[in-house]
Image (tube, helix red, strand yellow):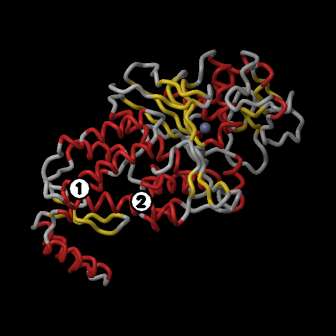
């Protein structure tokens, strides 16, 4: 734990030190998708940001638990299931599977826990019960609402006066005491095909209480970092704070870390704006290396533009790394090691990936200069650690570096045979490659040769 890590905390509006509740361990909860449609590139941003933030913390010696929930009980899911004419459970299950498959395509590993709201009903009911018992919530006709007037801290995250806070829920039934109150539990309605029993009536949880319960179940309260998109600050995160703090008399989380939105032209990429690009489509079009690079080229807190221009810039940056890796051979010279320190110092300063990337490319520039003048330069621990933290260590296996012409010719012949559906020849070329010590790995950017170990 060499570096002091600072994060721009949304709750206090200040840069604050990461001071874990349990020394040496960090718990992160980042709000995941509501699974009613395939995820778009904007949905993938928190997934990438917090997966990489975890890698950085591990590099600094912390043991990290990263939780990214899946919201599988929600109004949007009922609505989408009705339109598709399938049971909502089936739609949510299929979309959750698709979400896992699409995010697997990013090649950053899975979060440590991915709880489902539908599997957390017991803790949700218990938490709502605690809020009713302590006078912070009230049941009305089978619904349960949080009474915001009983929680003086309400509004502290989004920093706005009470009268400007509208929940965006319909209250046609007039059951709320105040218009700012929000639903913890919704009585079962005709046409909704999932419901659970609770002391105040059969129904299903509201979105906000699901996250408070899922986070507490795995990380406890007063955990270290709560993350998510900046569009969730109000009402979702404001309400999570109110629920947990009112029920437990302890803070929900120590630091609030919000990522900016993807911009498409002048607009935020969102399903409602109708300008989304699916994650699966983007992976197919640009490949995972360029897509991961695209995300780290922007500071996590700021909006990033999704365009041909920004994606092409990311692809060029990846190519620069690949070209350098092809030239590497031998040891890392001491003289360029300090660039890796600068890289990690930048990440310790509010996870500044653009500044960290600048240090990485200084390393690459210096290595190229040395190679040009005939010196031997190898990857060494510095380059390895930087690329691993960015989820791009696979670029070091661009093993064509050492592959001879014979191996490359066999790989090309295998591709041609596969394209012609001549699988016998393709398998034969694969076996010949294995004899030469090479494995063909299929990547989104096409096949690549990896040494067999
Ligand atoms: Zn959430």
Against 363, is 105 above or below?
below
Drawn side of residue 148 relative to residue 394, left or right: right
| Residue that lies at the very extreme toward the front in this rendered image | 373
Does the numbered disc 1 mark a residue whose Cβ is under 8 Å from ligand 1? no
Residue 369: mark: 1
Estimate how packed mark 2 is, as few (under 14), some (14 to 19) or many (20 or more) residues with alpha carbons within 10 Å: many
Residue 433: mark: none
| Residue at the image position 89 percent from the left and 35 percent from the top | 174
Drawn side of residue 154 relative to residue 282, left or right: right
Label 2 SS? helix
| Residue at the image position 48 percent from the left and 36 percent from the top | 67
Q: Which residue is mark 2?
A: 290
Nearer-the-camera pick, 311 or 233? 311
Q: Which quarter of the rendering shows the C terminus?
A: bottom left
Q: Which quarter of the rendering shows the N terminus?
A: top left
| Residue at the image position 15 percent from the left and 72 percent from the top | 407
Against 18, is 82 above or below?
below
Measured in 3D between alpha carbons, the distance from the residue under mark 2 to the one under mark 1, in whole angstroms, is 25 Å
Against 319, is 250 above or below?
above
Residue 65, position as x, y percentages in the image: 42, 32
Estimate how packed mark 1 is, as few (under 14), some (14 to 19) or many (20 or more) residues with alpha carbons within 10 Å: few
Cβ atoms at labels 2 and 1 below 8 Å apart: no
């Amino acid at each position: 734990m060499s570096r002091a890590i600072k994060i721009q905390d949304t709750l206090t509006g200040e840069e604050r030190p990461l001071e874990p509740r349990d020394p040496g361990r960090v718990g992160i909860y980042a709000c995941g998708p509501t699974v009613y449609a395939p995820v778009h590139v904007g949905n993938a941003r928190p997934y990438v940001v917090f997966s990489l933030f975890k890698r950085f913390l591990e590099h600094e010696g912390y043991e990290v638990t990263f939780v990214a929930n899946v919201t599988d009980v929600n109004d949007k899911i009922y609505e989408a299931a009705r339109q598709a004419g399938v049971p909502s459970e089936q739609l949510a299950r299929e979309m959750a599977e698709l979400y896992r498959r699409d995010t697997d395509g990013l090649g950053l590993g899975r979060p440590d826990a991915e709880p489902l709201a539908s599997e957390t009903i017991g803790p949700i009911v218990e938490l709502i019960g605690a809020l009713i018992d302590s006078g912070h919530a009230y049941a009305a006709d089978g619904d349960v609402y949080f009474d915001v007037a009983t929680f003086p801290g309400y509004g502290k995250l989004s920093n706005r006066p009470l009268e400007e806070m509208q929940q965006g829920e319909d209250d046609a039934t007039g059951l709320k005491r105040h218009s700012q109150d929000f639903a913890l539990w919704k009585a079962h309605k005709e046409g909704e095909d999932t419901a659970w029993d609770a002391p105040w009536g059969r129904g299903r949880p509201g979105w906000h209480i699901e996250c408070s319960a899922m986070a507490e179940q795995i990380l406890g309260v007063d955990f270290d970092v709560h993350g998510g998109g900046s569009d969730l600050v109000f009402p979702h995160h404001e309400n999570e704070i109110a629920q947990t703090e009112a029920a437990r008399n302890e803070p929900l989380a120590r630091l609030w870390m919000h990522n900016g939105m993807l911009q498409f032209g002048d607009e935020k990429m969102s399903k409602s704006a109708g300008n989304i690009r699916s994650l699966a489509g983007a992976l197919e079009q640009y490949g995972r290396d360029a897509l991961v690079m695209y995300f780290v080229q922007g500071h996590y807190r700021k909006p990033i533009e999704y365009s041909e221009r920004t994606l092409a810039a990311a692809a060029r940056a990846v190519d620069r790394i690949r070209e350098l890796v092809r030239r590497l051979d031998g040891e890392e010279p001491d003289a360029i090691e300090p660039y890796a320190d600068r890289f990690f110092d930048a990440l310790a300063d509010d996870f500044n990936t653009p500044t960290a990337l600048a240090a990485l490319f200084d390393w690459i520039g210096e290595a190229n200069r040395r190679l040009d003048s005939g010196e031997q330069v190898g990857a060494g621990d510095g380059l390895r650690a930087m690329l691993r933290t960015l989820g791009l260590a696979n670029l070091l296996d661009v093993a064509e570096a050492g592959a001879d012409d014979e191996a490359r010719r066999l790989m090309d012949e295998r591709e041609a045979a596969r394209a012609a559906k001549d699988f016998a020849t393709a398998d034969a070329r694969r076996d010949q490659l294995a004899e030469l010590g090479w494995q063909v790995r299929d990547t989104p950017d096409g096949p690549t040769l990896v040494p067999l170990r």
